[in-house]
């Protein structure tokens, strides 16, 4: 795993993982209890992270690539505009 910090704007944190998220759960990656093939996984980690960022008005998103076999999680550390 690699972590990148971008000084902005906006200030952001990116977590890079060497595995692609499986296609069947990509669209629902941040939903409660979503996991696939992960032994002892509860599916609460990404759900909890998304819940916390939404509560604080921040932005959390996921990009995954089969070609690169990688996943990147982006966290914007500036509140988003109310919408």
Image (tube, rainbow, N blue to C red):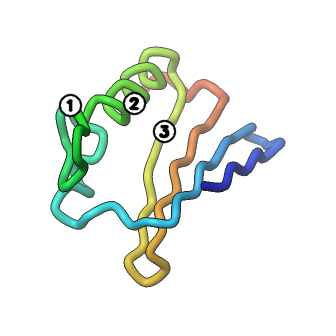
Vertically, is 3 above or below 30? below
Quarter of the picture holding the C terminus: top left
Mark linked to residue 60 = 3
Q: Which mark is residue 50?
A: 2
Left or right of residue 76, residue 53 in this image? left
User: Residue at 26% of width from left, 64% of height from top?
Assistant: 22
Q: Are marks 2 and 3 in contact (CB under 8 Å)?
A: yes
- Quadrant including the N terminus: bottom right
**Which residue was labeled with disc 1?**
32
Q: Residue at x 61, y 37 (%)?
A: 76
Viewer-side label of 1, 3:
1
List x then y, in percent, for residue 68: 49, 79
Outermost residue, bottom direction?
67
Q: x%, y% of residue 6?
A: 78, 47
Front residue of 36/46: it is 36
Q: Quadrant of residue 37?
A: bottom left
Whether 22 is drawn above or below 59: the answer is below
Q: Is residue 67 above or below residue 82?
A: below
Q: Residue at x 23, y 66 (%)?
A: 23
How many residues crowd around disc 1 within 10 Å: few (fewer than 14), some, or many (20 or more)? some
Residue farthest along the front direction in this orientation:
39
Foreground mark, 2 or 1, reads 1
* Camera-nearest residue between 58 and 34: 34
Distance from disc 2 to disc 3, alpha carbons, whole Å, reads 6 Å
Element at label 2 = helix
Q: Secondary structure at mark 3?
A: strand
Taking the spot 19% from the left edge, 42% from the top edge, the residue there is: 34
């Amino acid at each position: 795993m690699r972590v990148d910090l971008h000084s902005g704007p906006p200030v952001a944190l990116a977590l890079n993982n060497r595995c692609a998220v499986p296609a069947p759960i990509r669209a629902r990656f941040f939903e409660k209890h979503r996991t696939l093939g992960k032994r002892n996984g509860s599916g609460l980690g990404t759900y909890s992270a998304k819940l916390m960022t939404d509560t604080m008005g921040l932005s959390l998103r996921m990009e995954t690539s089969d070609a690169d076999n990688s996943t990147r999680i982006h966290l914007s550390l500036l509140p988003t505009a109310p919408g």
